[in-house]
Each structure stands twice: as C-alpha cells, then as structure tokens.
Image (cartoon, rainbow, N blue to C red):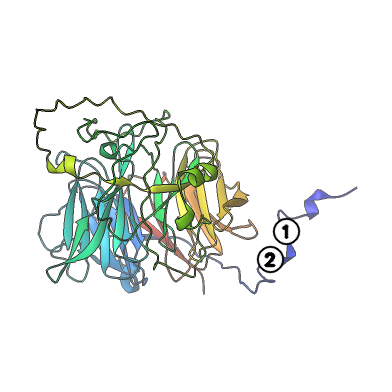
Amino acid sequence: MVNESNFKYDHFPHLQPATRDVSIPRFGRPVDIRGAPKLIKSIAWSCDGKRVAVGTEYKGLKVYEVRTVFEGTGFSLPSGSKQSPHNGHVAALAWSPIEGNVLLSGCKAASGGSSVVLWDVTSPSTPIATFKIPGDVLHLAFHPSGDHFAVVCPRSSFDEVLFYHRMMDDGKEIWKKRDDIALGAASSGGYEEINSLRFSNSGKLLLAVSNDGSIASWVYPLRLTSTPSLIQSSITQTPDNLSLPEDSQESNRPKTPRESTPEEVPSPVDPEMKRDLPDVDMPDQSQVDDSTVEQVEDISMMSRTAAPSRQATPPSVPAPMNNEEKRKSALLKRVRHSVVHCSSLLSLSLDPTGKFLAVGGQDALLSLFDTKDWICVRTFDVCTMAIRHSAFSPDGEMIAVGGDDSYIVVVAIYTGATIAKFPITGFINSLAWHPKRNMLAWSTTAKTVPVWYLVQQEA
C-alpha cells in the first residue's frame, strides 16, 4: 500500500530551489510603521527602491525615505501648510518606472470631483501637473517608457480609461490628456468594466481583468493618431451628431453583467517599441484585422446598431459642430479576450521578468499564466476568501497574495510551496514589494491607529 503522505505537492526535482541554485528566504516579523496622519489606503515603492509613498484618507499623501522608514519619519505632499490638490481619499499611487522622483497620485471622488496629480518629490511644494477627473479614480498605471500613464475611472454602467502623455510644447515639457484614443468611454461607444489594469513589460499591450472573469488585452499606440477615426458598426456608421448618454458619476460598481463590447477601431502600433522581455503572444500588427481579432477572442462580438440618421434637406445649411462633435476618439484595438475564471477577477500582477502574469478574484483562486502562450500553468489554492491584491517579488520567484482572508501568504512560483504567512487584522488595502529587495509592505482596513506594515528577509 502506498503511503500518500510521503509525497509532496508538485514536487518536481527540476523545479526545486536547490536544483535551480535559488535559496529559500526566511522572513522576520512584520514591523509597524507609524507617522501617517490618517488610515492608509495605498502604498507604492519608487523604481530605485529609495522611497515609499503612502496615500491616506482625507487627502493625505506622505513619502518615506527607505533608509529611515523604520523611524516613521517622512514628508508630506504638498509640503508646508499648502492646500492639497486632492479632494478625497488618496487610494491610488504609481511611481514612474524610469524616474525615482516622479510620483502619480489619485483620489476618490468628493463633492468637487477627483484629482490625478503628478509630483516631483524633490520639489514637494508644488505638483508638476494636476488633472481634474469626474467621479472616482480606481487605478493608476505607468507605461514602461515613463512617458504615458492610464487612469481607470469606474462608472455606473461601464468603466472609462483616460490616457495621458508627456510632450514638448514651445520647448517646454508638459503632460497632456490624449484625445486620440479611448477605452470604455461612452462618448466613444465602447463599454468595458475594469477591476485592475497594467501595461505589459514591453509597453505594446494594455492588460485588464473584469467582473466576467476575463483577461483582455489591447494594442497601445505610443504615437498620436493624426485624425481619430469614428466608431464603426458592422451595419452602419454612427452619425457625428448622435447624442449619447453622459457619464454617470456614481462610484458604486455594479454586480450584474453589462452590454457586450462593440467592435473596436484599429489603432497604429509604434514599430520602434521593442523590448527583450517576453510579452503576451499576439499576431503581427500588420496582419491584425477584424477577422483575426474574432478568431483570437473566445467571446462573440455583438454589433451595436446605430440610431437611424436623418436625411438632410438639400437647401438647409447644417448647424456648426462644437469641438466635442468634431473630434472623436478611436477605441483601442482589442486583440485578446479570454474568460479564465468563473467569477469576478479583482487583481492583476505581472512578473518583473516578463514570464508570467497572475490573476485572482472572488473564487479565492490565484492563476498563473504564461505570457508567451497565454495558458494557465499553475493555480494556487492558498486562500479561502476573495483575492484582491497580488504582487510578485523582484526576482520573480515568489508572489504575495491578500484579500478578505485574515492573512497574507507568500508562495513559491515554481513549486507552489508556502514560504511565509503573516496574520492581519481587517482586509488588505494595498500590497507592494520593494523593487530590489525581499521587503514587503501592506496596509489594512483596521481602524485603530494610522499604521502600515513592513516585513523583510532575515540576513
């Protein structure tokens, strides 16, 4: 009789740390970091690992130097007694991937609307740029080039993604909203729901997870399109003067399925954007057309019939159009849509080495996908409740997972072994690895004292 207890789960010799000359880290006890003014809502590390920023309730934003982080000392943005450009809780943060001093922050909606603010932390008194956003800011994502970023804004019946880029104007560097592309905007006819969004490591694709348990990807054009295209339907073209419903500013995310996504209009891809890192496999852009997209996607694309247009009377003169009617944003070209979970997906994280992406959600399962073949290579059953946050270690050997459970668990990517488990109080608000060291930071919803937690590998 075989004693099954002698076998280890997924014990493949060639994947063991000793075989791959990788040491298993040992973590110390979590340390409380104090000094924040209010409850911590978000945490993010700078790309060089020298700073960590925390966003708090009631407009709070604080930056700590890593060398003095255990002392709880830091500085606020903006510095001094200046009024914050934010109107609500700072629940979204993102550092530039190429500049260790550039920080992006977004807040929840308040009576005056939300704000997305770009900071140079070496000059904390005044932000680089401030953008007013109607409704909430759910998520922020920087492009790997550091010259673009995306803002996810939840709406009542769809989610809208706004894009911004850095450009030169009269010899001066400025940041400006892109009006040539759109994703999920009602004014452009697209309907998407997005719970988490990332740019691929190469920057060619935009990846997102949704409430229908799917992963989707779109081609992201770096260059501005000279003449934005009108939205096309398989039956007829949407008239320029068609009145579409305005964006709702409600922040509650619906739980019911939404309308099917209409066909997207292709956007050009920058041919010079090349990276050695593996990326999600996709057809060559020169060969991508509507028929190719339909073969790649595993969901039926229903066409949205435009409202009937009125035939113009010959002698009448058409009324002049305003700027919004003249300029239409082209929807990003979706190249893949795969339903991979049976429930809502809430978290999306990318391996720093570019080999894997991980998704988790309401079914308490974390799935690991190969970015080359777009197949699930492993599923981690280490949680019992919804997974809301996941983060890869800087070497790509481990992933930290947290959500509605009473703990954070760190598992090995290749073996599935549990490396560490840290008990928590409340639910996870934010989870982030240091970009160069095995140091993990997180915050929870526990309403005790303003504190966040830091744990690092023992020497």
Outermost residue on the front side: it is 314
Q: Can you identify the residue that label 1 sits on?
A: 11
Q: Residues within 10 Å of mark 2 (few under 14, many from 20)?
A: some
Residue 38 rendering spot, x and y as whole percentages? 25, 51
Q: Nearer the viewer, residue 162 or 29?
A: 162
Residue 209: image tag:
none
Secondary structure beneath label 1: loop
Indicate left or right for 146 with 87 as reference: right
Q: Nearer the viewer, residue 78 or 198?
A: 198
Q: Can you identify the residue that label 2 sits on?
A: 16
Using the rendered view, name the quadrant where residue 257 is placed: top left
Residue 200 rendering spot, x and y as whole percentages? 44, 58
Indicate left or right for 170 with 366 as reference: left
Residue 190 rendering spot, x and y as whole percentages? 34, 38
Indicate left or right for 370 with 30 as reference: right
For badge 2, the amino acid type reads Gln
Q: Residues within 10 Å of mark 1 (few under 14, many from 20)?
A: few
- Identify the mark nearer the N-term, 2 or 1: 1
Indicate left or right for 135 with 366 as reference: left
Residue 61 rendering spot, x and y as whole percentages? 23, 57
For badge 1, the amino acid type reads His
- Residue at 29% of width from left, 66% of height from top? 64
Is residue 224 something one can see in this rendering? yes
Rounded to the nearest whole Å, what is the CA distance between mark 2 and mark 1?
8 Å
Image: 416 above or below 1: below
Residues at circles 2 and 1 in contact by the CB criterion of under 8 Å: yes
Secondary structure beneath label 2: loop
Q: Nearer the viewer, residue 48 or 177?
A: 177
